[in-house]
Structure formats: structure tokens, C-alpha cells
């Protein structure tokens, strides 16, 4: 479930607002999205994956956390934007497809040159 939008990192691109399939966010007057309907979050991680500056934290749990970690705690634990990093989205990151060693993967990926 979405737990945090970092006002320090967010650049106001509103991609999270646009990609959220359940309309969880509202664009704030300052351009920074706010979590308006947390109970509608489906924990799909799409918003976190699309955030270009790793400004979102989606908890893997389906209920709001009783004690939401602070932004500093999330940064120190390398959790802020961690799903995007896991996927390999963003400059300088290795994609999951590049790491895949499944025997059939060569049949669906283009040949390496």
C-alpha cells in the first residue's frame, strides 16, 4: 500500500497520478501529488516503478502501516524507490531481463550483438 510521497525528491511530474489504476493520488496545489485515497491502493507498485526520481514508497502489505517509517529511515534502509531499482528502471541500472537466465528467454529476446 502506498505510504509515502517524498516532498524532498518529488519533481511534480505527476506520472504517479497518471499511471495509478485506482486513482489514489490528487495533484496538490504545489504540484506535489498527495495520497488522497490510500484505501483504494492495490499495492501494484506501478506508481513507484514510474517515478523517475524514486520519491515514492509502496509497502508490500495490503493494510496501512501502523507506524509509517520516516523518509530518512526509508532512505537509510534503501527502500525509497526500491521497486524501481529492483526492476532495473532508471539510468545505470541492470534490468531484470538482462539478469534472466531462464532457458527460453533467448527465444523471446532479440539477439545480442
Image: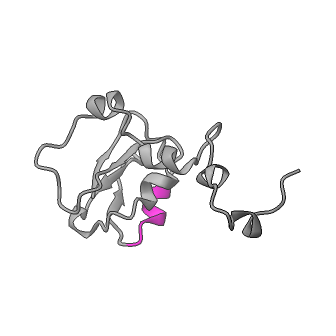
Q: What is the tally of numbered marks visible in this picture?
A: 0
In this rendering, does residue 14 appear at all?
A: no
Q: Is residue 100 visible?
A: yes
Q: Is residue 9 above or below residue 62?
A: above
Looking at the rendering, the stretch of residues picked out in magenta corresponds to 15-21
Which is more toward the observer, 97 or 75?
Answer: 97
Q: Is residue 3 above or below residue 19?
A: above
Q: Position of residue 35 (x, y in %)?
A: 28, 56
* Furthest residue in direction right, as rendered: 113
Across and down, in percent, residue 63 comes to: 18, 61
Residue shown at 61% from the left, 40% from the top: 93
Residue ranking furthest to the left: 66
Q: Is residue 33 left or right of residue 11?
A: left
19 magenta-colored: yes
Residue 93 on the magenta span: no
Residue at (50, 57) in percent of width and height: 15
Q: From the viewer's perspective, is residue 29 above or below residue 72? A: below
Residue 69, position in %: x, y?
21, 38
Q: State which quadrant residue 16 falls in.
A: bottom left
Q: Is residue 82 left or right of residue 72?
A: right
Q: Is residue 69 left or right of residue 101?
A: left
Say how the picture is coloured: one colour
Q: Secondary structure of the magenta portion, mostly?
A: helix
- Residue sticking out furthest to the bottom: 22
Image quadrant occupied by the N terminus? bottom left
Rendered location of residue 80, percent (x, y) = 38, 39
Along the horizontal axis of the image, is 73 left or right of 98? left
Q: Residue at x 76, y 69 (%)?
A: 107
Amino acid at each position: 500500500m502506498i505510504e509515502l510521497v517524498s516532498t524532498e525528491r518529488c519533481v511534480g511530474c505527476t506520472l504517479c497520478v497518471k499511471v495509478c489504476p485506482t486513482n489514489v493520488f490528487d495533484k496538490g496545489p504545489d504540484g506535489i501529488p498527495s495520497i488522497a485515497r490510500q484505501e483504494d491502493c492495490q499495492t501494484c507498485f506501478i506508481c513507484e516503478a514510474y517515478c523517475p526520481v524514486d520519491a515514492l514508497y509502496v509497502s508490500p502489505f495490503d493494510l496501512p502501516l501502523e507506524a509509517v517509517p520516516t523518509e530518512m529511515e526509508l532512505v537509510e534502509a534503501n527502500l525509497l524507490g526500491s521497486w524501481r531499482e529492483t526492476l532495473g528502471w532508471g539510468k545505470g541500472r541492470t534490468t531484470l531481463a538482462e539478469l534472466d537466465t531462464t532457458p527460453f528467454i533467448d527465444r523471446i529476446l532479440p539477439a545480442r550483438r
